[in-house]
Amino acid sequence: MVPYRRTGDGGDCHPQYRGPIPNLTVGGNVHRLVTRVLAVAGLSCGLMVSGLQAQGLVEVEHHNRFEFTPFGAYQWGGTYDTDASSSFPAGELHLQDSFGWGAILGFLMEEAGAVELTYLRQDTDINFDPISGSQRALGGFAINYIQIGGTGILSHKGQLRPFLSGSLGLGIFDPKTEGIGSDTRFSWSVGGGAKYMFKSNRVGLRFDARLWITPFPSGDYGTWCDFYGCFVAEGTTWVTQGTLGGGLVLAF
Protein backbone atom coordinates (compact mmCIF):
# COMPACT_ATOMS: atom_id res chain seq x y z
CA MET A 1 0.00 0.00 0.00
CA VAL A 2 1.36 3.43 -0.96
CA PRO A 3 0.78 6.20 1.59
CA TYR A 4 -0.33 9.62 0.45
CA ARG A 5 0.92 13.03 1.46
CA ARG A 6 -1.45 16.02 1.25
CA THR A 7 0.02 19.27 -0.01
CA GLY A 8 -0.05 22.37 2.08
CA ASP A 9 -2.63 24.15 -0.06
CA GLY A 10 -5.13 21.37 0.15
CA GLY A 11 -4.67 20.43 -3.48
CA ASP A 12 -4.26 17.05 -5.04
CA CYS A 13 -2.51 14.35 -3.14
CA HIS A 14 0.76 12.91 -4.54
CA PRO A 15 2.04 9.47 -3.75
CA GLN A 16 5.19 9.38 -1.60
CA TYR A 17 7.45 6.32 -1.66
CA ARG A 18 8.88 5.46 1.73
CA GLY A 19 10.75 2.30 0.78
CA PRO A 20 14.55 1.88 0.50
CA ILE A 21 16.46 4.45 -1.62
CA PRO A 22 17.62 2.93 -4.93
CA ASN A 23 21.39 2.69 -5.64
CA LEU A 24 21.83 5.39 -8.30
CA THR A 25 25.23 4.85 -9.99
CA VAL A 26 25.85 8.52 -10.76
CA GLY A 27 29.64 8.08 -10.97
CA GLY A 28 29.34 5.23 -13.50
CA ASN A 29 26.89 7.18 -15.64
CA VAL A 30 29.21 10.21 -15.71
CA HIS A 31 32.19 8.04 -16.61
CA ARG A 32 30.33 6.47 -19.54
CA LEU A 33 29.19 9.88 -20.71
CA VAL A 34 32.73 11.33 -20.62
CA THR A 35 34.10 8.29 -22.44
CA ARG A 36 31.56 8.66 -25.22
CA VAL A 37 32.25 12.39 -25.55
CA LEU A 38 36.03 11.80 -25.79
CA ALA A 39 35.54 9.03 -28.35
CA VAL A 40 33.38 11.27 -30.52
CA ALA A 41 35.90 14.13 -30.16
CA GLY A 42 38.83 11.88 -31.08
CA LEU A 43 37.02 10.54 -34.13
CA SER A 44 36.15 14.06 -35.22
CA CYS A 45 39.78 15.22 -34.83
CA GLY A 46 41.02 12.22 -36.79
CA LEU A 47 38.63 12.91 -39.64
CA MET A 48 39.56 16.59 -39.62
CA VAL A 49 43.35 15.90 -39.73
CA SER A 50 42.84 13.36 -42.51
CA GLY A 51 40.92 15.95 -44.49
CA LEU A 52 43.65 18.56 -43.95
CA GLN A 53 46.33 16.10 -45.02
CA ALA A 54 44.37 15.32 -48.16
CA GLN A 55 44.21 19.05 -48.91
CA GLY A 56 47.95 19.49 -48.21
CA LEU A 57 47.32 21.85 -45.25
CA VAL A 58 49.14 19.67 -42.71
CA GLU A 59 52.75 18.55 -43.31
CA VAL A 60 53.40 15.00 -42.16
CA GLU A 61 57.00 13.94 -41.47
CA HIS A 62 57.87 10.71 -43.23
CA HIS A 63 60.61 8.48 -41.83
CA ASN A 64 62.49 6.52 -44.46
CA ARG A 65 64.65 3.42 -44.00
CA PHE A 66 66.63 3.30 -47.25
CA GLU A 67 68.13 5.69 -49.79
CA PHE A 68 69.32 4.99 -53.34
CA THR A 69 71.49 7.64 -54.98
CA PRO A 70 72.73 7.36 -58.57
CA PHE A 71 75.44 9.97 -59.13
CA GLY A 72 77.98 11.37 -61.54
CA ALA A 73 81.36 12.80 -60.59
CA TYR A 74 84.48 14.47 -61.89
CA GLN A 75 87.51 12.39 -60.86
CA TRP A 76 91.14 13.46 -60.93
CA GLY A 77 94.55 12.31 -59.73
CA GLY A 78 96.12 8.88 -59.57
CA THR A 79 99.87 8.68 -60.08
CA TYR A 80 102.32 5.86 -59.46
CA ASP A 81 106.09 6.35 -59.37
CA THR A 82 108.24 3.69 -61.02
CA ASP A 83 111.97 3.03 -60.89
CA ALA A 84 114.41 1.29 -63.15
CA SER A 85 114.18 -1.96 -61.19
CA SER A 86 110.46 -2.42 -61.98
CA SER A 87 108.79 -3.54 -65.21
CA PHE A 88 108.79 0.12 -66.29
CA PRO A 89 111.80 2.41 -66.51
CA ALA A 90 112.08 5.19 -63.98
CA GLY A 91 109.24 7.65 -64.33
CA GLU A 92 105.59 8.15 -63.46
CA LEU A 93 102.33 6.46 -64.46
CA HIS A 94 99.52 8.97 -64.56
CA LEU A 95 95.74 8.49 -64.85
CA GLN A 96 93.95 11.16 -66.85
CA ASP A 97 91.18 13.20 -65.25
CA SER A 98 87.73 12.15 -66.47
CA PHE A 99 84.07 11.64 -65.65
CA GLY A 100 83.00 8.88 -63.27
CA TRP A 101 79.65 7.42 -62.32
CA GLY A 102 78.21 5.15 -59.65
CA ALA A 103 75.53 4.61 -57.03
CA ILE A 104 75.10 4.60 -53.25
CA LEU A 105 72.70 2.35 -51.33
CA GLY A 106 72.17 3.60 -47.79
CA PHE A 107 70.46 2.18 -44.70
CA LEU A 108 69.28 5.11 -42.57
CA MET A 109 69.93 5.10 -38.83
CA GLU A 110 67.35 7.59 -37.51
CA GLU A 111 69.11 10.97 -37.15
CA ALA A 112 72.65 9.64 -36.65
CA GLY A 113 73.42 9.09 -40.33
CA ALA A 114 73.51 6.03 -42.56
CA VAL A 115 75.41 2.86 -43.37
CA GLU A 116 76.26 2.96 -47.08
CA LEU A 117 77.46 0.68 -49.87
CA THR A 118 79.21 2.71 -52.58
CA TYR A 119 80.20 1.82 -56.14
CA LEU A 120 82.22 4.20 -58.33
CA ARG A 121 83.63 3.58 -61.82
CA GLN A 122 85.96 5.71 -63.88
CA ASP A 123 86.94 4.99 -67.50
CA THR A 124 90.03 6.91 -68.50
CA ASP A 125 93.48 6.68 -70.15
CA ILE A 126 96.85 6.05 -68.56
CA ASN A 127 100.07 7.75 -69.63
CA PHE A 128 103.70 7.08 -68.81
CA ASP A 129 106.04 10.00 -68.25
CA PRO A 130 109.65 8.74 -68.07
CA ILE A 131 112.41 10.67 -66.36
CA SER A 132 114.21 10.91 -69.69
CA GLY A 133 112.19 11.06 -72.87
CA SER A 134 108.70 12.16 -73.89
CA GLN A 135 105.37 11.13 -72.44
CA ARG A 136 103.49 8.34 -74.17
CA ALA A 137 99.99 6.92 -73.93
CA LEU A 138 99.60 3.34 -72.76
CA GLY A 139 95.90 2.88 -73.56
CA GLY A 140 92.58 2.76 -71.76
CA PHE A 141 92.19 2.12 -68.05
CA ALA A 142 89.24 1.49 -65.70
CA ILE A 143 89.07 2.05 -61.95
CA ASN A 144 86.31 0.52 -59.81
CA TYR A 145 85.78 1.26 -56.13
CA ILE A 146 83.46 -0.99 -54.10
CA GLN A 147 83.33 0.10 -50.48
CA ILE A 148 81.13 0.00 -47.39
CA GLY A 149 81.07 2.79 -44.86
CA GLY A 150 78.76 5.47 -43.60
CA THR A 151 77.88 9.10 -43.10
CA GLY A 152 77.49 11.14 -39.94
CA ILE A 153 74.98 13.98 -40.09
CA LEU A 154 76.35 17.25 -38.66
CA SER A 155 73.06 19.16 -38.47
CA HIS A 156 69.38 18.19 -38.67
CA LYS A 157 67.99 21.73 -38.83
CA GLY A 158 66.21 22.57 -42.04
CA GLN A 159 66.24 20.70 -45.31
CA LEU A 160 70.01 21.05 -45.93
CA ARG A 161 71.94 18.40 -43.99
CA PRO A 162 75.77 18.50 -44.08
CA PHE A 163 77.66 15.29 -43.33
CA LEU A 164 81.06 13.61 -43.05
CA SER A 165 81.71 10.27 -44.75
CA GLY A 166 84.17 7.40 -44.69
CA SER A 167 84.40 3.93 -46.23
CA LEU A 168 86.57 0.82 -46.57
CA GLY A 169 86.70 -1.74 -49.34
CA LEU A 170 88.35 -2.58 -52.63
CA GLY A 171 89.94 -0.65 -55.46
CA ILE A 172 90.08 -2.58 -58.75
CA PHE A 173 92.56 -1.21 -61.30
CA ASP A 174 91.92 -2.70 -64.72
CA PRO A 175 94.07 -1.94 -67.81
CA LYS A 176 92.12 -2.30 -71.04
CA THR A 177 95.21 -3.42 -72.94
CA GLU A 178 95.08 -7.10 -73.85
CA GLY A 179 97.45 -9.38 -71.99
CA ILE A 180 97.58 -7.21 -68.83
CA GLY A 181 95.50 -8.38 -65.89
CA SER A 182 93.66 -6.27 -63.32
CA ASP A 183 94.99 -5.55 -59.83
CA THR A 184 92.68 -5.57 -56.78
CA ARG A 185 93.83 -3.65 -53.71
CA PHE A 186 92.50 -2.68 -50.32
CA SER A 187 91.45 0.98 -50.32
CA TRP A 188 89.47 3.50 -48.33
CA SER A 189 87.98 6.97 -48.65
CA VAL A 190 87.24 10.03 -46.53
CA GLY A 191 85.08 12.99 -47.44
CA GLY A 192 82.10 15.16 -46.78
CA GLY A 193 79.16 16.83 -48.43
CA ALA A 194 75.53 17.75 -47.98
CA LYS A 195 72.04 16.49 -48.78
CA TYR A 196 69.08 18.69 -49.58
CA MET A 197 65.77 16.88 -49.06
CA PHE A 198 62.55 18.30 -50.47
CA LYS A 199 59.45 18.67 -48.26
CA SER A 200 58.14 15.23 -49.13
CA ASN A 201 61.35 13.79 -47.60
CA ARG A 202 61.35 11.19 -50.40
CA VAL A 203 63.42 12.99 -53.05
CA GLY A 204 66.51 15.11 -52.67
CA LEU A 205 69.90 16.15 -54.02
CA ARG A 206 73.30 15.02 -52.76
CA PHE A 207 76.72 16.64 -53.19
CA ASP A 208 79.95 14.78 -52.34
CA ALA A 209 83.67 15.46 -52.17
CA ARG A 210 85.91 12.44 -51.49
CA LEU A 211 89.53 11.41 -51.35
CA TRP A 212 90.21 7.79 -52.39
CA ILE A 213 93.40 6.21 -51.05
CA THR A 214 94.95 2.93 -52.23
CA PRO A 215 98.34 1.55 -51.10
CA PHE A 216 100.54 -0.18 -53.68
CA PRO A 217 103.92 -1.89 -53.30
CA SER A 218 106.59 0.58 -54.32
CA GLY A 219 109.14 -1.88 -55.71
CA ASP A 220 111.73 -0.60 -53.25
CA TYR A 221 113.07 -2.97 -50.62
CA GLY A 222 114.63 -2.31 -47.28
CA THR A 223 116.62 -4.56 -44.95
CA TRP A 224 117.02 -4.40 -41.20
CA CYS A 225 118.41 -6.72 -38.57
CA ASP A 226 117.68 -7.27 -34.90
CA PHE A 227 118.21 -9.90 -32.23
CA TYR A 228 116.04 -12.42 -34.12
CA GLY A 229 117.74 -12.01 -37.48
CA CYS A 230 117.58 -9.92 -40.64
CA PHE A 231 114.42 -9.06 -42.57
CA VAL A 232 113.60 -7.66 -45.99
CA ALA A 233 110.40 -5.69 -46.63
CA GLU A 234 108.98 -3.91 -49.63
CA GLY A 235 108.00 -0.28 -49.35
CA THR A 236 104.59 1.25 -50.06
CA THR A 237 103.47 4.02 -52.36
CA TRP A 238 100.06 5.69 -52.14
CA VAL A 239 97.77 6.21 -55.11
CA THR A 240 95.22 8.94 -54.33
CA GLN A 241 92.28 10.27 -56.34
CA GLY A 242 89.82 13.05 -55.71
CA THR A 243 86.14 13.06 -56.61
CA LEU A 244 83.60 15.87 -56.75
CA GLY A 245 80.09 14.73 -57.62
CA GLY A 246 76.36 15.04 -57.23
CA GLY A 247 73.35 12.77 -57.44
CA LEU A 248 69.62 12.34 -57.03
CA VAL A 249 68.46 10.89 -53.68
CA LEU A 250 65.48 8.50 -53.77
CA ALA A 251 64.31 7.64 -50.25
CA PHE A 252 61.87 4.88 -49.31
Image (cartoon, rainbow, N blue to C red):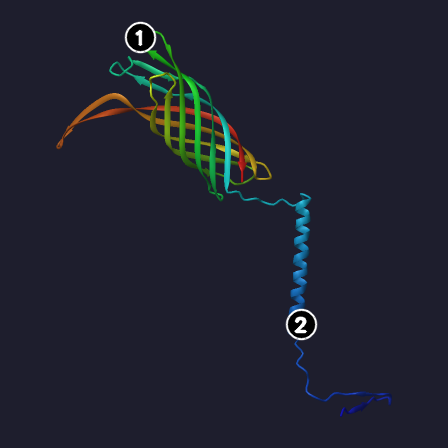
Q: Residue at label 1? A: 132
Q: Secondary structure at mark 2?
A: helix
Contact (Cβ within 8 Å) of mark 1 with mark 2: no
| Numbered label tally | 2
Look at 21% across and 23% down and name the residue there.
Answer: 222
> Where does residue 75 sit, x and y in percent of width and height?
44, 22
34 vs 194: above or below: below
Q: Nearer the viewer, residue 7 or 120?
A: 120
Up the image or down, 113 lies above or below 71; here it is below
Residue 63 to residue 229: above or below: below
Hey, which quadrant is residue 124 in on the image?
top left
Residue position for label 2: 29
**Image x and y of residue 62, in percent:** 57, 44
Residue at (31%, 10%) from the top-left corner? 131
Q: Is residue 15 left or right of residue 58?
A: right
Figure check: 39 above or below 114: below
Please identify the quarter of the rendering in which residue 134 is found: top left
Q: Nearer the viewer, mark 1 or mark 2?
A: 2
Instruction: Locate residue 87 relative to residue 35 in the image: left or right.
Output: left
Residue found 68% across the figure and 60% down from its top: 40
